[in-house]
C-alpha cells in the first residue's frame, strides 16, 4: 500500500462545506443525477440501491460516522448486482495509489463496487477529479443528507484541493488522468 496524498489538518475545514446541494430525499438527488453515477459511502450507496439504481462506481468501507453499518446496509450492498468488486486499503485522511487506480478503473466501464479497508471519506475527491463531464458524485453529509455534485461544476476546486494535500500530487493527477493546469479536460 502506497500513500500518494495525505490530508493535513489545515485543509480539513475546506471539506466541511458541501461541494454541491444537500438533499434529504435520495429520489431528489437521483432525479437530477448525471451519468456515470458515483456513490461514496455505505449509507448513500444503500439508499441509491434501495431506490433501484446501481451506481457506475460505489465506494464503501462498512462504516458510518465511525461505527459499523448495520447488517441490512451491509447485506444490501453485498448483494447488489455490480459487474466487479475490488478491495483496496486506504487509511484515514489519505488517498492511496490503489484507491486512485480503483476510481479510474471503476469509471472505465460497467459497474464497480470498491470495498475499502480503512476509510473512503476522501474518495469523493478523486472521483470528482476523474469522472467525465456530466457525471454525478453523491456522498453523505453527516446529519444533513446526501450531497449531489455535478463534477464539471466543481472539478477545478477539487483539483486545487488535491494539489494542496501533502504527498505526490503529480502522481495523483497522472493516475487520475487530470491536467492540473486545465482541470476541465479530465
Image (spheres, rainbow, N blue to C red):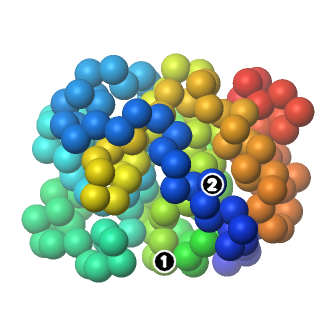
Q: Mark 2 points at which residue?
A: 14
Q: Where is residue 125 in the image (x, y as percent from the top left)?
A: 60, 49
* Residue at 40% over, 33% down: 21
Q: Where is residue 78 in the image (x, y as percent from the top left)?
A: 23, 61
* Residue at 88% over, 52% down: 170
Q: 29 above or below 43?
A: above
Callout in the foreground (1, 2) = 2
Q: In which quarter of the image is residue 37?
A: top left
| Dot 2 crowding, Cα within 10 Å, few <14, some 14–19, many 20+ | few
Secondary structure, mark 1, is: strand
Residue 110 visible in this rendered orientation of the protein: no
- N-terminal label among 1 and 2: 2
Secondary structure, mark 2, is: helix
Q: 35 above or below 97?
A: above
| Dot 1 crowding, Cα within 10 Å, few <14, some 14–19, many 20+ | some
- Looking at the image, residue 43 sits to the left or right of residue 163; the answer is left
Depth check, front residue: 43 or 141: 141
Q: Name the residue under label 1.
A: 118
Residue 53 is tagged as none
- State the separation of the CA atoms marked 1 and 2: 22 Å
Amino acid at each position: 500500500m502506497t500513500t500518494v496524498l495525505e490530508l493535513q489538518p489545515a485543509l480539513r475545514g475546506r471539506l466541511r462545506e458541501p461541494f454541491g446541494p444537500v438533499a434529504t430525499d435520495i429520489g431528489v438527488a437521483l432525479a437530477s443525477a448525471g451519468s456515470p453515477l458515483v456513490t461514496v459511502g455505505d449509507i448513500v450507496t444503500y439508499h441509491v440501491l434501495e431506490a433501484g439504481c446501481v451506481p457506475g462506481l460505489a465506494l464503501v468501507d462498512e462504516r458510518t460516522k465511525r461505527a459499523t453499518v448495520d447488517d441490512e446496509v451491509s447485506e444490501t450492498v453485498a448483494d447488489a448486482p455490480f459487474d466487479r468488486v475490488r478491495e483496496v486499503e486506504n487509511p484515514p485522511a489519505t488517498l492511496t495509489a490503489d484507491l486512485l487506480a480503483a476510481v479510474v478503473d471503476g469509471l472505465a466501464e460497467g459497474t464497480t463496487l470498491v470495498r475499502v479497508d480503512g476509510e473512503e471519506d476522501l474518495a469523493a475527491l478523486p472521483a470528482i477529479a476523474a469522472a467525465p463531464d456530466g457525471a454525478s458524485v453523491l456522498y453523505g453529509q453527516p446529519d444533513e443528507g446526501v450531497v449531489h455534485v455535478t463534477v464539471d461544476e466543481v472539478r477545478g476546486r477539487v483539483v486545487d484541493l488535491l494539489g494542496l494535500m501533502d504527498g505526490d500530487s503529480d502522481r495523483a493527477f497522472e493516475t487520475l488522468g487530470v491536467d492540473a493546469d486545465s482541470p476541465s479536460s479530465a
